[in-house]
């Protein structure tokens, strides 16, 4: 075990997709995407302690065994580490299988923590390759903040938005209200992508236009939000269309879907507005979260970065 092995902690944020466009089907069976990922201040917490073997302890609702992506991430990285034991403790708050990328965020957090703990010395682009092999949403969380995802959604370009002249993260003056209904579907993401048809395709222009507007300092508006998986998800999760309609009726706001769902979200101008909207919809089944934009990993955890540059 490296001499520097110690107890390290990282916060693993949830994500929303501000846009998610499907451009078409790829020869590898995946779909070509243009999506804007936005990390938000709803967090799992992952701790690592020195240990002889790789172990995971879960506090909360998440897979406990080898199905947990954290263990797959640890085993993938261990191939590059001379000494590789770790006791990983996951405090799970982000609902699983909800379109919030919680499992992917935990896996990326494990890669970053263990790369430090084991002194593996992989660069961010080398970690991104491992992350891609774990799932299409995992690479984003190596940057976090706000980023454009293309390819399978795993080709990440961080968007330098919401920062001041010194590079400090300010966050957009926007709050998010999330409502996660208790709908579950085995193999959800694959099931929903299977229902995507040509009529759901677009050419990426919605995403490019929003990137341009945000880069010009314009505000994010509800009408900017777009998700091509909304129709397919409503077909797959039968009560979802009705759930969205009820959210709208109760709050007077329109709501959209994050990723493959079933989490729905809307924008609010202030924290007070967000709390009011959350209480207006509180009678609906499921869980509510009020959050705002989360900073990039580099500002949230400077002690774990910079990652080494590629050799
Ligand atoms: O990469 P991940 O395991 O999250 O993807 C789950 C499934 O979602 C894939 O097996 C694929 O069927 C579908 N998918 C897709 N196109 C993407 C991402 C995921 O078709 N860009």
Image (cartoon, helix red, strand yellow):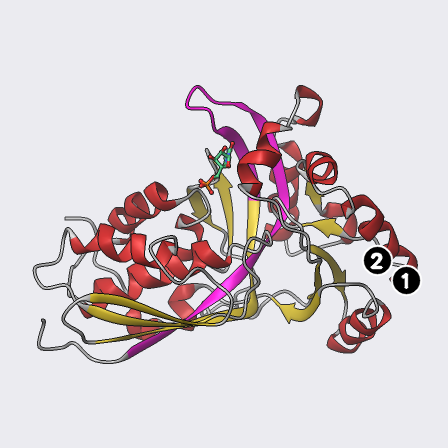
Q: Is 2 above or below relative to 160? A: below
Where does the image place residue 303, in percent across and percent down from the top left?
30, 75
Which segment did they paint magenta? 8-35
Q: State the mark number for residue 250.
A: 1
Residue 43, percent across and down? 51, 70
271 or 130: nearer the eye? 130
In the rendered image, which quarter contains the N terminus?
A: bottom left
Give the secondary structure at mark 1: helix
Q: Do the CB atoms of the residues marked 1 and 2 lie less than 8 Å apart?
A: yes
Vertical arrangement, residue 25 with respect to residue 282, above or below: above
Q: x, y (%) of residue 105? A: 44, 58
Of residues 157 and 21, the one nearer the viewer is 21
Residue at which label 2 appears: 247
**Magenta: main secondary structure:** strand
Q: Give whichever of 98, 291 is nearer the camera.
A: 98
Check residue 9 for magenta coloring.
yes
Tag 2: Cα neighbours inside 10 Å, few (<14), some, or many (≥20)? many
Q: Residues within 10 Å of mark 1 (few under 14, many from 20)?
A: some
Q: Can residue 305 be seen?
A: no
Tag of residue 237: none
Q: Quadrant of residue 114?
A: bottom left
């Amino acid at each position: 075990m490296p001499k520097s092995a110690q107890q390290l902690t990282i916060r693993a944020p949830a994500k929303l997709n501000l846009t998610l466009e499907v451009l078409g089907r790829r020869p590898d069976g995946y779909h070509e995407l243009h999506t804007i990922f936005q990390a938000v201040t709803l967090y799992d917490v992952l701790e690592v302690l020195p240990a002889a073997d790789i172990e995971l302890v879960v506090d909360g609702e998440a897979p406990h065994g080898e199905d947990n992506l954290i263990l797959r991430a640890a085993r993938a990285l261990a191939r590059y580490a001379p000494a590789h034991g770790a006791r990983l403790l996951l405090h799970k708050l982000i609902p699983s299988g909800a379109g919030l990328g919680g499992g992917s965020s935990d896996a990326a957090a494990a890669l970053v923590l263990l790369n430090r703990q084991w002194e593996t010395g992989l660069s961010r682009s080398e970690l991104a390759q491992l992350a891609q092999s774990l799932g299409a949403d995992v690479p984003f969380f190596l940057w976090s903040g706000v980023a454009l995802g293309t390819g399978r959604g795993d080709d990440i370009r961080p968007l330098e938005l919401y920062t001041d002249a010194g590079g400090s993260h300010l966050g957009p003056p926007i709050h998010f209200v999330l409502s996660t209904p208790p709908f579950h579907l085995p193999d959800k993401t694959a099931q929903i992508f299977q229902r995507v048809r040509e009529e759901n395709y677009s050419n990426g222009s919605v995403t490019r236009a929003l990137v341009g507007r945000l880069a010009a300092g314009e505000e994010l508006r509800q009408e900017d939000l777009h998700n091509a998986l909304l129709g397919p998800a409503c077909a797959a999760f039968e009560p979802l269309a009705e759930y969205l309609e009820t959210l709208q009726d109760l709050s007077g706001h329109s709501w959209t879907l994050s990723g493959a769902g079933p989490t729905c979200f809307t924008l609010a101008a202030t924290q007070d507005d967000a709390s009011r909207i959350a209480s207006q919809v509180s009678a609906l089944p499921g869980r509510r979260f009020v959050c705002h934009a989360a900073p990039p990993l580099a500002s949230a955890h400077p002690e774990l970065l910079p990652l080494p540059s590629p050799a």
